Amino acid sequence: MYPELILVIALIIFMVIYNKLVSVKDAFGDNNIFIQYFKESDYDFLLIAKYGDLVYDPNEVFMKRVKKAGIAFLVALFISTLTGKFGFITLIICIVVAYMVFKNQYWSLNNHRKAHLNQIDSLLPYYLKGLEILIHHYTVPVALAKSIEDAPEVFKPGLRRLIDKIEAGDSSVDPYMDFAKEYPVRDSMRMMRLLYRLGLGEQEKKHEQLTSFSKSVSSLQAKAREEKYKARLDKMEKETMKMLVCTGGCCLVLLLISIFSMMSF
């Protein structure tokens, strides 16, 4: 019964595509339904944070995840059909296998971010420090455009999108907030709001606002240095504990060997 059911589903899918009820181009193109509904909001950031300029198109990498999950599902389905053990529970297992294959890379990227959290979070304050120098001489939009060349690689795509939205006439806070959502590093929301307000300020008050912005950036840098130092101390403590446990374990083993040797003697 189940092989026949699979054949019927395959025929329905074929008829839907053949009659152009669903566009294959829309399903697998650059702006397809998978990217719109299944792509994680921080996926691009995590991907570029790990691989940098080695990633040319995050959407293309994401679609490879989708294809691998689809292949895993079909392989699991085919094996279960061949063994004659296909049923509702088996179908659920096939879906779980596909889901795990789909999510595997994202989990790996998240683990990388957790392992390098302080390093990634420190990128924003050091970038903003360079941007602050440019803002002394240019307006905020012009300073942002000029900062792209020397910005961390992970921020460059988002900065270009931010500039494009501003140049398209969007004078609201939305482009800045979109950037902060795309790059969810520490205090990104607060700093982008400050940057937006700095761009709105009157020329007479620019020095005062810039001083306030500079203090916030310096505070963020100090916090990043503190977190980096704390992480280094934690790592040293863990290494010290490992060394003490190993040394203590070796001493205990030697002591036990000596005791048993004396008892035997």
Image (cartoon, rainbow, N blue to C red):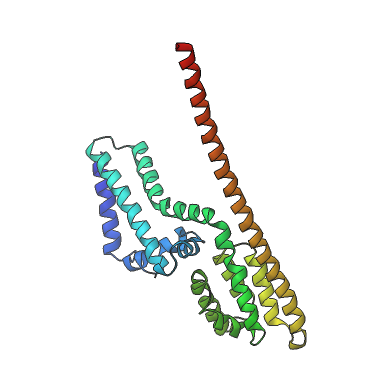
In the rendered view, does 263 fall on the left or right side of 177?
A: left
Q: Residue 174: tell me if it is visible.
A: no
In the rendered view, does 252 fall on the left or right side of 203?
A: left
Q: Nearer the viewer, residue 239 or 258?
A: 258
What residue is rendered at 45% in x and 52% in y? 108
In the rendered view, does 40 fall on the left or right side of 56?
A: right
Pinpoint residue 219: horizontal percent, then vertical percent.
Answer: 70, 66
Q: Nearer the viewer, residue 181 or 231?
A: 231
Q: Is residue 82 above or below residue 65?
A: above
What residue is rendered at 55% in x and 65% in y? 183
Q: Residue furthest front?
A: 265
Q: Residue 158: tell me if it is visible.
A: yes
Pinpoint residue 126: horizontal percent, then vertical percent.
Answer: 60, 70
The N terminus lies in which quarter of the figure?
A: top left
What residue is rendered at 70% in x and 74% in y? 214
The C terminus lies in which quarter of the figure?
A: top left
Pinpoint residue 7: horizontal percent, then vertical percent.
Answer: 24, 48
In the rendered view, does 32 fall on the left or right side of 141?
A: left
Pinpoint residue 145: horizontal percent, then vertical percent.
Answer: 55, 82
Q: In this view, does 11 lie above or below 159?
A: above
Q: Which of 158 and 2 is in front in this view?
A: 158
What residue is rendered at 53% in x and 35% in y? 247
Quadrant in the picture for residue 94 = top left
Instruction: Report the number of discs.
Output: 0
